[in-house]
Image: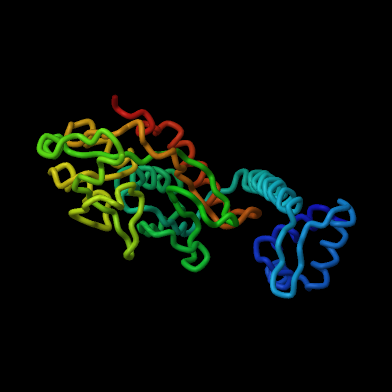
Amino acid sequence: MNTLNAMQCFCRIVDLESFASAATDLGVSTAQISKQISALESHLKVRLLNRTTRKVSPTEIGMLYYEKCQQILTDLGELESMIEQQGKEPQGVLKISAPIDFSTMYLMDVFTAFQQSHPKIQLDINLSDQFVSLIDEGLDVAIRIGDLPDSTLVAKRLSTTYLSHYAAPRYLRKHGIPQTLEELSEHQTLRYVMNGREFGSALQKSRWTMSCNNGRAMCEAAAHGAGIITKPNFMVLSYLRDGSLVELLSQHRRPPVGIYAVYQHRTHVPCKITHFVDFLADYFRDQDVWNHPLA
């Protein structure tokens, strides 16, 4: 038994919840896949998968094995790509998806710097606040903020951010400063809404006065006294510096969430993707200013 091949087969079965789908994805027969898993379970002396006529799912020990296998395969793929790509120059079109406000505030300069340092690369950038499918949209890399629902993607953490509440001094002079989360329900608030859903707010029970699908516009409205917003700290840094917004209830900040670069493949990653992700990681290593809020 080739243990590495068996691990790859097992992981694809868990990802796709099907022997047949995994076989199609790997370009082998279902019988070959089944034989690999049987040999793997015999070797380990445990059952890794629960099989029904409708679905395949990992057992408890199977899920632990899956998580370790994923890490091993990721590390091996990155090592092989690193060795293979030594001396290669990235080239071609690199398709990127990234959040609108975060990109205009922090990413366009690093995108430009990357392209200038790799002149054979063409950047095709799609700005959207929605989590678009990398496969369906033919994307190479996506920049995402928050929880990552799709565990099949490779994710490299670039930085972190947190959400907190902010308002303009002029608003607070008129309406008072909330001292507890419960008091927020008595205030005017601004909602961030996309496709009819509200995101990133602890203020759903409050008396909202304005909703908008653009975070930067919400910050501008709040700075002019429209109400209280709940936004990531990187978005309000300039407003905090000039005093047009102040933080409220800092003791109730949301737990930090990650800012990630995500891509599809765990093995044979094109060098244009690995160079770009490494370039972003190096940049953000020195750009964590928003994680040190103004006192």
**Residue at x 48% of width, y 49% of height:** 147
Specify the quadrant that holds the N terminus.
Answer: bottom right
**Is 12 rendered above or below residue 148?**
below
**Is 171 rendered above or below residue 63?**
above
User: Would residue 4 appear left or right of 114 to someone viewing this image?
Assistant: right
Quarter of the image holding residue 59?
A: bottom right
In depth, the one of 15 and 115 nearer the eye is: 15
In depth, the one of 236 and 82 nearer the eye is: 236
Q: Position of residue 283 (x, y in %)?
A: 43, 37
Q: Position of residue 241 (x, y in %)?
A: 22, 31
Quarter of the image holding residue 122?
A: bottom left
Q: Position of residue 109 (x, y in %)?
A: 34, 43
In depth, the one of 234 and 108 nearer the eye is: 234
Residue 220 is at least partly visible in this image: no
Quarter of the image holding residue 53?
A: bottom right
**Is 157 rendered above or below residue 196?**
above
Q: How is the image coloured?
A: rainbow
User: Would residue 111 appear left or right of 181 to someone viewing this image?
Assistant: right
Specify the quadrant that holds the C terminus.
Answer: top left
